Image (tube, rainbow, N blue to C red):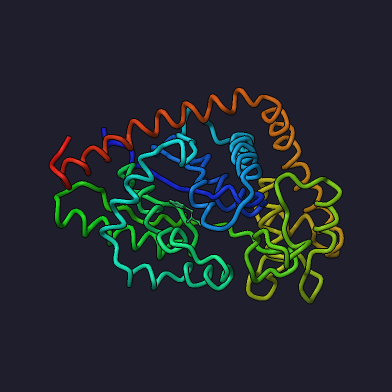
Amino acid sequence: MEEKKTIFSGIKPSGDLTLGSYIGAIKKWVELADSYNCYYAIVDMHAITVRHDPAALRRRTLEQLALYIACGLDPKKNVIFVQSHVPAHAELAWVLNCYTMFGELSRMTQFKDKSQKHADNINAGLFTYPVLMAADILLYQTDLVPVGDDQKQHVELTRDIAERFNGIYGDVFKIPEPYIPKVGARIMNLQNPLSKMSKSEQDAGGCICLLDKPEDILRAFKRAVTDSGSEVRYDPQEKPGISNLMQIYAVCTGKSFEEIEREFAGKGYGDFKMAVGEATVALLRPLQEEYNRLMADKAYLEDVFAEGAQRASAVAEKTLAKVRSEERRVG
Ligand code: TRP
């Protein structure tokens, strides 16, 4: 039997998860669990590259775990853990720093963007952020890294670092590839259907968070931007607003675009927006209930983290031992 491939992804515990993150990422992860060995790290050490509130970081880390489980990500089938609970990440990152060029890191577009946004705090961690990410990925001998477009450059750099290291010391690391799921339901901002749904202050009303209250969700859909015309028809070019709402409705109800078009034939955008709002509330209700139940059981969540760290460490330590012995001929 062929061995299962390994998937690794990391998410910072720095923002609220959105309907876009659920449909575009987490829901897909749930489906991958049986066919791959999956590792999902909550990357708290990446989160401290910008100034943060320690209590909030701790709280969000636990909340994020509860949300993953509530979304259906099974901690028995997937290894879900906190990056800082596995010290191998920090150690490998240091070693890889010595195999990464200043010029390579200077070319990272995310570094350039972030140093503009945080001009008062361009710390070295922000600069070497992609090296820690490379360590995350390489420790698990990862085959595939599911990421959005914005992270592809970091995965490319990871490959370059791994190839450089292997070129000197032999096959220490598996060379990973970015994994962009084929049918990518990308959920767009409700106020601006040409840009991705993501949490930021500027797009109030355009973004649905998984823990939003039903009345706020309904209001956001009622106010969602639509297109000219009055027909509910799937056409991302001509009707980006309606098509985005159709994507959401399709995920919530399991209906095809044709079925949706038939359901709303002769009805206006108003009726359709109401229906999408209600379907989203219905999708999120059980998820929110499960989240609340889990958050009331912190001991269980801490156990999941402890077990995740143990399972992750076992694999990470093996790779690290190989690095130590090849690079230093010790141990
Ligand atoms: N840099 C990623 C982001 O900003 C998060 C991340 C950290 C990551 N380590 C990773 C993603 C390893 C994939 C694999 O979204």
Rendered view: 137 above or below 269 = above
Look at the image and tell me in which quarter the C terminus lies.
Answer: top left
Rendered residue at 78%/76% (across/down): 228
Look at the image and tell me in which quarter the N terminus lies.
Answer: top left
The picture places residue 50, in percent across and down from the top left corner, at 56, 58
Rendered residue at 70%/37% (across/down): 287
- Observer able to see residue 272: no
Q: From the viewer's side, name the closer residue of 269 and 126.
A: 126
Image quadrant where residue 284 sits: top right
Is residue 313 toward the left or the right of residue 236 in the image?
Answer: left
Rendered view: 185 above or below 56 = below
The picture places residue 304, in percent across and down from the top left corner, at 53, 27
Rendered view: 160 above or below 39 = below
The picture places residue 208, in percent across and down from the top left corner, at 73, 54
Is residue 132 toward the left or the right of residue 164 in the image?
Answer: right
Q: From the viewer's side, name the closer residue of 133 and 74.
A: 133
Is residue 82 toward the left or the right of residue 134 in the image?
Answer: right
- Observer able to see residue 284: yes
Q: Count of labels shown?
A: 0
The picture places residue 19, in percent across and down from the top left corner, at 67, 51
Rendered view: 250 above or below 289 = below
Rendered residue at 18%/53% (across/down): 166
Q: From the viewer's side, name the closer residue of 232 and 303.
A: 303
Image quadrant where residue 312 sits: top left
Rendered residue at 69%/54% (across/down): 248
